[in-house]
Image (cartoon, rainbow, N blue to C red):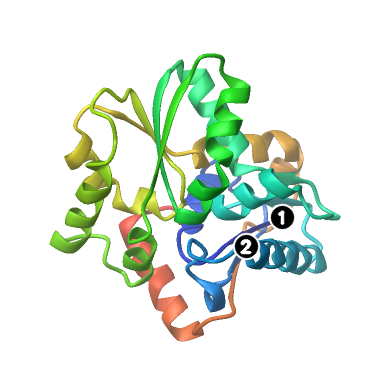
Amino acid sequence: MIGLFDSGLGGLTVLQRVRERLPLVDVLFFADQAHVPYGDRTHEELLRLLRANLARLDEHGVDAIVMACNTSCAIAERYGWPCSRAPVIDLIESAALAVERAGFRRIGVVATAATVGAGSYGRTLRNHITGIDVVEVPAPALVPLVEAGLVTGAQSRAAVAEVCSHLPLDLEALVYGCTHYPLLEEHFRAALGGVALIDPAVVQAQRAADLLGDRNRTGGAAMTTYLTNGDEGAFRDAVARLMALAPGV
């Protein structure tokens, strides 16, 4: 069994990619909705939540932890990863691999305020790719919209357009620095035209498949267990709604 966690619903976009690559394994997905959004929390709070969430997944006996929260990865990049029994696959490292493989050099990153404030995306990308130009832009309004189910319509379109107005005009690619943002992709495409959009979850899922190897073909009952420390009824409804928007979740 592999474990994923996010502050809320955004991690379902990573789960979707994991299920595409690992259809047979058992998956435990935990949404820390009691503390969403993460983006406006202090680094000390976020480090405490990261430790608690890793420990929760370890207690369930997962074989690997596939991170579905960029903000937690940013905190770990800055302060170090807490101890975990299971190996952890870092989402920001996956983003850097995706950019490196695509060959882009003029990159934008849209992320939560905490992720941008930690500077982790810029450091990781520059460590992987010599001469890369990285512009990071905070988007604090977007996670609450997704958590409220407002992924279509004029309000979310205007919010994405406002974020994108702070990006340079000569971008080659934009990296989703938060797992909530792929659910707003139609608005990013409308705002950015032909700019390539990079979802780190694609490489994240590939790395998970590589780590598990033969266990993907021989073990598990293809069961997905969803947990939240928020409103369970609202969470069930949101999962069902997002499954309709993104088949495969």
At x 39%, y 77%, the residue is 237
Q: As rendered, which of 147 and 66 lies closer to the eye?
A: 147
Q: In terms of secondary structure, where does tag 2 sit?
A: loop
Mark 1: amino acid: Gly
At x 84%, y 54%, the residue is 83
Q: Position of residue 70 (x, y in %)?
A: 55, 50
At x 49%, y 25%, the residue is 99
Q: How many marks?
A: 2
Marks 2 and 1, Cα distance to the nearest angstrom?
Answer: 7 Å
Q: In terms of secondary structure, where does tag 1 sit?
A: loop
**Around disc 1, counting alpha carbons within 10 Å, would you say few (fewer than 14), some (14 to 19), or many (20 or more)?**
some
Q: Position of residue 3 (x, y in %)?
A: 68, 58
In which quadrant is the C terminus drawn?
A: bottom left
Quarter where residue 159 is shown: bottom left
Mark 2: amino acid: Met
Q: Position of residue 91 (x, y in %)?
A: 59, 43
**Which label belongs to residue 220?**
1
Q: Is residue 202 left or right of residue 85?
A: left
In which quadrant is the N terminus drawn?
A: bottom right
Quarter where residue 193 is shown: top left
* Circles 2 and 1: CB atoms closer than 8 Å: yes
Pointer 2: what residue?
223
Vertically, is 191 above or below 171? below
Q: Position of residue 231 (x, y in %)?
A: 49, 84
Q: As rendered, which of 36 and 130 lies closer to the eye?
A: 130
**Which label belongs to residue 111?**
none
At x 79%, y 46%, the residue is 87
Residue at the outermost left position: 154
**Around disc 2, counting alpha carbons within 10 Å, would you say few (fewer than 14), some (14 to 19), or many (20 or more)?**
few
Quarter where residue 145 is shown: bottom left
Vertically, is 106 above or below 55? above
Q: As rendered, which of 246 and 119 lies closer to the eye?
A: 119
